[in-house]
Image (cartoon, rainbow, N blue to C red):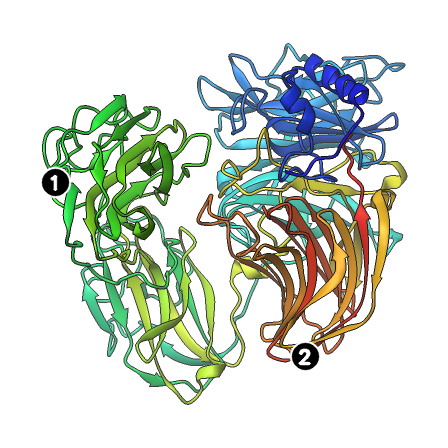
Amino acid sequence: MSRTTRPRRRLLAALAVLSGLGLVAASPAMADTLYHEQYRPQFHFTPAQNWMNDPNGLIYYKGQYHLFFQYNPDGNTWGNMSWGHAVSTDLVHWKQLPVAIPQDDQEMIFSGSVVLDKNNTTGFGSRKNPPLVAIYTSAQKATGKQEQALAYSTDGGTTWKKYSGNPVLDIGSTNFRDPKVFWYAPTKSWLMAVALADQHKISFYSSPDLEHWTHQSDFGPAGATGGVWECPDLFPLPVDGNPEKTKWVLAVNLNPGGIAGGSGAQYFVGDFDGKKFTSDDNGSYTPPSGTVVQDFESGSFGDWTATGNAFGSAPATGPVDGQQTVTGFEGKDFANSFHGGDASTGTVTSPAFTVTSDYINFKVGGGNHPYRSGDILGDEPTPTGETLADFEGSTYTSPLGDWTATGDAFGTGPAQGTLPNQQQVTGYLGSGLVNSFLNGDASTGTLTSPAFTIDKKYLDFLIGGGNHAASSDAPTAVELIVDGKVVRSATGPNSEALNWSSWDLSDLQAKQAQIKVVDANTGGWGHLNVDQVVLSDTQAQPRSDETGVNLLVDGKIVQSATGADSENLDWASFNTAAYKGKKVQLQIVDANTGGWGHVLADQFTAADKPALSTTQRARWLDYGADFYAANTWTDAPGSRRVMTAWMNNWNYGQAIPTSPWRSADTFPRQLSLKTVNGRVQLIQQPVRELAGLRGAGTRVPSTRSANTTTPLAVHGSALELQADLTPGSADRSGLDVRTGAGQRTRIGYDTTTGEVYIDRTASGATDFDPTFGGVQRAPLALHGGRLSLHVLVDASSVEVYAQNTRGEQVTLTDQIFPDPSSTGIDTFAEDGTATLNHMQAWQLKSIWP
C-alpha cells in the first residue's frame, strides 16, 4: 500500500474537518491512509469515501470551480442518490464539502445543472445577491417518475433550499432526466437540454424564469443509439479560434452502446438557433460496393445449410411471432433466429467459397453474446465423477447430506425451473435447480453444502444469474471454502441461461471443503442459478451461448461479430485480406437460450473496403472504456470550456476493487474546435493547470526497438508523458506503463488496422468482472507520419491524447488496477522496428495532504 508520511498535527486537523462533514470516522487506522490507499488516484478527484457517479451542476462562481456529483452518502455502491459537492480554485486541488442536496423520503436527486440567476428571474434572491439555482431530476421513489425540480442557494452554494413549487417540469415519464440549463442571450431566456432517455432524444425547452418551461424541439435519434441517452450538454465554441465563426457542440452520453462497450460519450457538431439543434452530419451512409455473397432475397436459404429450429424453414420477411419491430435489413428477406422465441437455437452455414476481396461486409443484429474461444457449440455430455448435488428432490438433500439454507432467497428446497416474474431459465439439467429469485431480486441468503473431501482434479457445475463477484460488496457467487477461507469463486453472466463452470483443484487434493452459494444482492440481477455440482477428473467446457456471425477457415472460427441487444441490423465487417485465395465459410449462429437469445443477419457482400457500423461512424468524445456522463463548467473565466467525466463504466462500476471510495473523475480537459481536413473536430487537452503538479522531469533520448521491449529510465505511478512515435515497419509499437510483477498497460499503435489502442488485459486486477479486461481501440491514420502521445498515468487510470501530424486527434481513458510496485515504463515494437523519437516525462505531485 502506497502511503505518504505526513506531520501528525496536519493529519489530525484534516481528520477533524472530514469528521465534521460526516465523511469519515475518526479512527487512527483511517487517518494513517486516507487519500493514499491502494488504487487511490493522486491527481484526480475522488470523494473521501463512498460511491460517486455523474459529475453535474458544474459552475464557476466567485473564484471557485464548483463540482457537484451523484453521491451515495451511506455506501460504496449506487443508491441514496444525493448531490455531493467539492470546490477548487485551479481545477486540480479539490476540497470536499458537505452533501449539498440530500435525498429524502420522497425523492432521489439525480443529475442536473447549476446556473447563476444574475437577474433574479426566479425571485429566489435579489439583484444585489442573485441566487445559484440547481435544476435537477427529481426521481420519485413512490412512482418512479422523473421530474425536473429546483433548489437554490443564496450563500454561494454552501446550503440549498428546495423550491416549494416543485416539480417545474413533469411529462409523466420514468425516462426524462439530466437537465443542462444555460442562459441564451439572443432571446433573453433560459434554455434546457434534457434527455428522453429511452427514446434516444434530447428535448429543448425555454423559460423566462426557470419555473415555467415551454417545449421547443427534439433532436434524435441520431448517431449511436445502442442504449439509453443521458446527461446532455450543449455549448458554443469558436472554430479555429475565430469568434466570428461559431459552432455548437451537443454532447450525449449513452449506456450501453459505447464504442468500447457499456458506457460511452458521443458528440455532434452543428447549429443552434435558440429552439432547434441541427447536426452537420445528417447520418446518411452508403456502404462500399461489392459482390453480393448472400442477400436471402430468393426466399430460401439456397445452398446455405440450416440446423436446429431457430431460423425456421426460410428467411424471414420481418418480425416473427412475439418479436418486436425489426429494422435495418436490406430488401425484403433476412435471416432471423427468433422462430420459437429466444429459447430456440440453430445455425445457418454457407458452403465453402474462395476469398477474392479484402473484406466481407454484412449486417447483423439481435443479441449481444460474443463468440468465446474454447466454448463448445452444441450439447456437451455431463462430466462423469461424483455428483455432489443435482437438486432433483423437494429439499436440499444430496449424497453429501443436507445443505443448509439461511435467509429467504433459497426457500426450503430447489426450484422447479423458472420462478414467478422471472425471465425464462434455461440450461439446467432435469427438473430442479438452485434459484435464489424466490420473492425476486430483493431476497438474500446463503446455501451451504456439508463438508466433503477433494479427491478429484476438477469441480464442475452449472451457473447462471447475476454477475456480482465474490469480492464485491453484494455478491451473487458460488464459493469454495477450505480451512475457513474462500479459495475459489464464480458468478453468473447476467443471464438466466446456466452454463458450465469449472475449478482446477489440483493444489487442494485431500482437503476438506464446502460449497457456499451466496446471494447478498438486492439490486438488478440480484440472484443466482446453480445446478449439477460434480467432482470429476474431466474439466467441463462451457457451452457456446453466442448469437452472431462467424468466419471459418479450415472449420475454425477466425473472426466473429455479434449484435447489440437490438432488433436493428447494422453493418459489420470481416477483414479477409489474409485469406485471399483460401476457402472459407460464413456461419450464422444462435446458441443462446436466454434474454436476447437470437440473431439477425443479412446482405453478405465481398468488397475492397470495410463497411462501418453506426457506432463506428459516431463521433466519440473518448474511445476508452471509462469516460461517461461528460459535462462542462458554466461561466468559466475567459469563456473557456472545460469538461470532466465519470471515470468508470456501468458494466463493472460497482465492482471495481476500491475502498472506502468508489469512482473518480477524469482530469479536466480544455475543449476547442478545429478544422481538420475540411471537417470541424473537437480537440481536447489537459487543462494548463496540470503543469503546476509537475515535479522532477526526465528527457528520454531517441530509442529504437526491434521485436523487443526496452525499459526506459522512468518510473512512477503518477506521471505525465509526452512522446513522439514512428511506427516504422512494426505491426504494433508504443509504450508500456505501470510495468512490473508481470503487469503492464500497453498504449500502442497498430499499423495493420490504423488504430491507437490501450491493452489492459495484463494491467493488474482484472478478474472482478468479465467485461473489464480487454483492448480499447480508436481509428487514427498516420499517413506515413509520426504519432504524438500525451499520456496521464495515475494510481488507477491512464488517459491518452493521441494526434497525427495533420492534427486529427483521438482520446482514450481506461481504469487500471496494478500492484503499487508496478511503476516501470517501457517502449516496445512487435513484428518489426519502431522508434520512440523522444519522450519527456514528469513526476506529478499528489493533490492530497
- Which disc number belongs to residue 453? none
- Looking at this view, is 269 or 764 the one in front? 764
- Which disc number belongs to residue 431? 1
Q: In this image, 755 relative to 12: left or right?
A: left
Label 2 belongs to which residue? 833
Residue 660 is at least partly visible in this image = yes
Between circles 2 and 1, the one closer to the viewer is: 2
Element type where label 1 sits in the image: loop
Vertical order, 383 against 437 (above or below): below
Tell me which corner region of the image, top left, top right, bottom left or bottom right, holds residue 150.
top right
Residue 646 in the image: state x and y as whole percent.
63, 39
Residue 821 in the image: state x and y as whole percent.
64, 48
Vertical order, 625 against 604 (above or below): above
Vertical order, 428 against 544 (above or below): above
Q: Which residue is found at the position 32% from the left and 80% from the top?
A: 554
Q: Which residue is found at the position 80% from the left and 36% from the top?
A: 91
Q: Which residue is found at the position 80% from the left and 37% from the top?
A: 92
- Looking at this view, is 378 or 123 the one in front? 378
Q: Which residue is found at the position 31% from the left and 46% from the top?
A: 508
Tell me which corner region of the image, top left, top right, bottom left or bottom right, holds residue 24.
top right
Q: Quadrant of the N terminus?
A: top right
Q: Residues within 10 Å of mark 1 (few under 14, many from 20)?
A: few
Residue at the farthest bottom position: 581
Element type where label 2 sits in the image: strand
Disc 2 marks a residue whose amino acid type is: Thr
Q: Quadrant of the C terminus?
A: top right
Residue at the farthest left position: 393
Among the two numbered marks 2 and 1 on one chain, the one whose residue lies closer to the N terminus: 1
Vertical order, 804 against 153 (above or below): below
Disc 1 marks a residue whose amino acid type is: Ser
Residue 424 is at least partly visible in this image = no
